[in-house]
Image: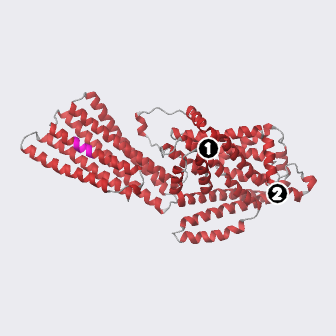
Amino acid sequence: MEQNYWLIAFQLLGSLALLMYGMKTMSDALQKMAGPQLRHVLGAMTTNRFTGMLTGVGVTAAVQSSTATTVMTVSFVSAGLLTLGQAISVIMGANIGTTLTAWIMSAGFTFNITSMVYPAFLIAIVLIYSKKRRVLGDFLFGVAFMFLGLGTLRQAGTEMNLGENPAVLNFFSSFDPESFGTTLLFLLIGGVLTMCVQSSAAVMAITMILCSSGVLPIYQGIALVMGENIGTTVTSNIVALSAGTQARRAAFAHMFFNVFGVIWILMVFKPFVNMVCSLVGYDFEMQKEVVGAEAFAANAAKLSFVLAAFHTCFNLINTTILIWFIPQIEKLVCAVIKQKPDADDEDTRLRYISGGLMKTPELSVFMAQREIVLFGQRIQRMFGMVMTLHNMAREGSDDKEFNKLYTRIEKYEGISDNMEIEIAQYLEQVSDAHLSDESKGKIRQMMREISEIESIGDACYNLARTLNRKKLSGKSFTDELEYNLGQMLKLTDESLTQMNRVMEGRREDFSLNETYRIENDINALRDRLKQENIQAINEHRYDYAVGTMYTDMVSECEKLGDYVVNVVQARLS
């Protein structure tokens, strides 16, 4: 008998694993099918708190992952595409959208659905081998695994016969159902369990098994669900500790939303639970000894729907209350989590992909693209320092200030090397995941982009080295050379500005024509300046060493322009 219990326990754990795997596969496949569209929806449909909330509901219900919605939202806040207030409204909607999962699970616990999954497996494998419909096949596989997990969970719960097990019954009956302390204890257990298994769906499934088998009273079951709501936000806050300020603020706002809801629910706990029970038609006063085992079991079968209904009512009412106070919530989270003061060393770290928030490969690709945009902006900032260094050398500025700026440019060159390596390593990890063909193509393009941007950093450093060499030699350029060099630097900066404009925008809005035009102007100016330099040296207007440093800078600017063209080509290809 003991061996049977072990087998059933392993069946229970395996079923939970199937459920979690199925939900993740289904969510990933949906994001592959509609990832770009979902991102555009989040960016376009958050004009006010109500559309933001409805957008969060719709997107989360579609991808079956509040985490994915929250991560997308936080990434948009970090990128400046959404305000924190808009993000809070989307997160509120995500809390409502995720309740659909509980309804799906409650349906799976009510009737046997395992017989329906086998045709889904067959269709899924056909679609996967057809290649063109592979993502749709992945989605069906995920749905089938999820329902198979639910079906086997239901079967395992029935076979364990927990409602007739004296040890289990005695354990749960040892807690006083009328005690407020019992409610708080089960709330804590639910939160800890969710943090341990990293899945609120798994904790919800365990709660449904215990409640529907008649072992766990409804009040304790609902306390577990409330704990699960807090536990899932604690996890996101821990992960966000290593992320940016806006990510930590959004995660804290998510926690505040759920903690606030739990506090007011605890104040009206039993009346509220009784109201939900009456809505579903569950008799919480029914006793097995009075009505008999069959009627009691039929009543207990409704408990999974009670849990789902409570989850939905909790989030709906909580959102209805708090949606009017989004500006106040925003002020609160900003007061609790203050913005770090800007410092030079802020440019030494990655901003978008260092927090470890990405749990879905498609979103990771998007965040890597945001990091590359930042990479391009930092490189143009580095070139701006080179232009300032050129002006300082021309005006004969103080050696101390010149050396300080030169050292900073040298530091930026090391930063660009590190950024290329870190982004490349991140993309390599993402490429190991199951990605759509479009995302695989994007990764190849991004690998080329970061390589060329790093080469721009090298060119900037070479320009600074030439200026430093000129200063150390004590030689100077003529006014004509300074003017010509200024024109070349200005054109080069224009090419970098156009590159960053393309990197930040949408592919459809740009072409290569403007980049080619600037590059042709740079090439024409280089050819003219080199020809004039040869003539000037022959006429002894300045010595050969000055001419060499001058042409080195002109050639380096032309190389930099070539690297810019390569970046734009990779972006628009």
Position in image of residue 184 (x %, y %): 75, 39
Q: Is residue 224 magenta-colored?
A: no
Q: Give the side of residue 457 with respect to residue 61, left or right.
A: left
- Residue ID for mark 2: 161
Identify the residue shown where x is 81% and y is 42%: 271
Bounds of the magenta span? 486-491
Amino acid tagged 2: Asn
Q: Is residue 392 visible?
A: yes
Quadrant housing residue 19: bottom right
Identify the residue shown where x is 87% and y is 55%: 296
Q: Give the side of residue 137 with respect to residue 484, left or right.
A: right
Name which of mark 2 and mark 1 comes first in the sequence: 2
Identify the residue shown where x is 47% and y is 59%: 439
- 10 Å crowding of disc 2: few (<14), some (14-19), many (20+): few
- Residue ID for mark 1: 235
Considering every residue shown, the one lying at the far left of the view is 539
Quarter of the image containing the N terminus?
bottom right
Which mark, residue 66?
none
Q: Is residue 11 above or below residue 525?
A: below
Position in image of residue 519 (x %, y %): 26, 52
Q: CA distance from mark 2 to mark 1?
A: 33 Å
Position in image of residue 279 (x %, y %): 79, 51
Q: Nearer the viewer, residue 376 or 17?
A: 376
Q: Give the side of residue 539 with respect to residue 118, left or right.
A: left
Q: Is residue 146 above or below residue 465?
A: below
Secondary structure found at label 1: helix
Q: Nearer the viewer, mark 2 or mark 1?
A: 1
